[in-house]
Amino acid sequence: MKKKTSAPAEKAVTSGKLLRDLRTMIVQARQDVARQVNSRLVILYWNIGQRIRQDILKMKRAEYGKEIVSAVGRQLSEEYGEGFTEKSLRRMIQFAGAFPQEQIVATLSRQLGWSHFKEIIPLADPLKRDFYTEMCRVEQWNVRTLRRKISGMLFERTALSRKPKKLIEEEIKALREEDRLTPDLVFKDPYFLEFLGLKDRYLEKDIEDAIMREMENFILELGVGFSFIARQKRISVDDVDYYLDLLFYHRRLQRLVAIELKLDKFKAEHKGQMELYLRWLDRYERQPGEETPIGLILCAGKSDHHIELLELDKGGIRVAAYLTELPPRDLLEKKLLEAIKAARSRMDAKALNMPQGGCRHAKERHRL
């Protein structure tokens, strides 16, 4: 016969700290076990892929290699299930080829699951693979978020993608080895604001109102680490009051981020306005240990040459377009790739026109 628990004792257990602590212990233990299993599976799949690659490379015969994978896949799937079919084995081979260093895979396996790697492996560009891998690790994206970032062409929209290959590699290496996140990894262009539901005609206030309604989605588009502080932040200089549209704080960059919304294309006068806001924030709002505030001007359009002449990056100001309606993916991809190519061409031309001493100093700075 089941012994009944007295009502006072049951109430004390169910509402007390003991039960909460025990639940926490159980959940944490289950999560730890799941992480360990996941890590072992990732390493296993890498080892399988590496082992098969080694055998196939020894044979130096592509057709024979296909036969090996097919035969091994049939045998293993019969013994161990669908996780080891020919298709799965080919993915493991790609995995070992895309991530040739076992130690890096072992480190990543503690935070990224096999489902994460399956999204990253098909990316043909090694720089993109490394970018999404490290950003996923640092910002702890789930698989759904990673998939959305890739399909939304996050890499192509970052300022990082506009840099020469060597500088991109250096920033990703710093992210991998030091967890060092830079503004070029955080800010992007353009920003997708289609979730705001804005129609053909709207005012700046309409954008602000829509952002406040959709703050969660807006922060998702901005990226991990942004925290909302204020809307229409009053900035008083002498007897004049100015109002900053939106003020955020980025935890990893450890700095305030001022955002101004513009209905039209970027104009030179926007620079002076943002500079005033940043100087004021730096003097009156910046806390000890924080970095200098940075500004983001979101416009309906912009001229890259115009922005380059104003040297906005030196003042900690970023300018980006926003899209309230997304174009077809092929058109968006074409425009982004053109923008990347043009930006890299401008950087190359600038380097060629730099005095010899300037080039040497620039290279020394990059090494540092």
Image: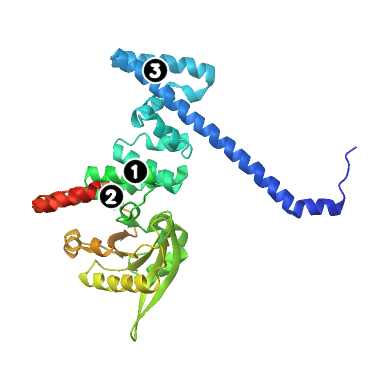
Q: Residue at x 34, y 64 (%)?
A: 292
Q: Horizontal placement of 96 versus 302: left or right?
A: right
Q: Are marks 2 and 1 in contact (CB under 8 Å)?
A: yes
Cα distance, mark 2 to mark 1?
A: 10 Å
Mark 2 or 1, nearer chain start:
1
Work out whether mark 1 precedes mark 3 in sequence or the reverse, and give the earlier one: 3
Q: Is residue 133 visible?
A: yes
Identified by mark 1, the residue type is Phe
Q: From the image, tell me which residue sits under label 3.
A: 69
**Amino acid under label 2?**
Leu
338 and 330: which one is in front? 338
Q: Residue at x 53, y 16 (%)?
A: 79
Q: Which mark is residue 160?
A: 2
Circle on res. 131? 1
Measured in 3D between alpha carbons, the distance from the residue under mark 1 to the one under mark 3, in whole angstroms, is: 30 Å
- Locate residue 104, reporting x and y percent: 40, 34
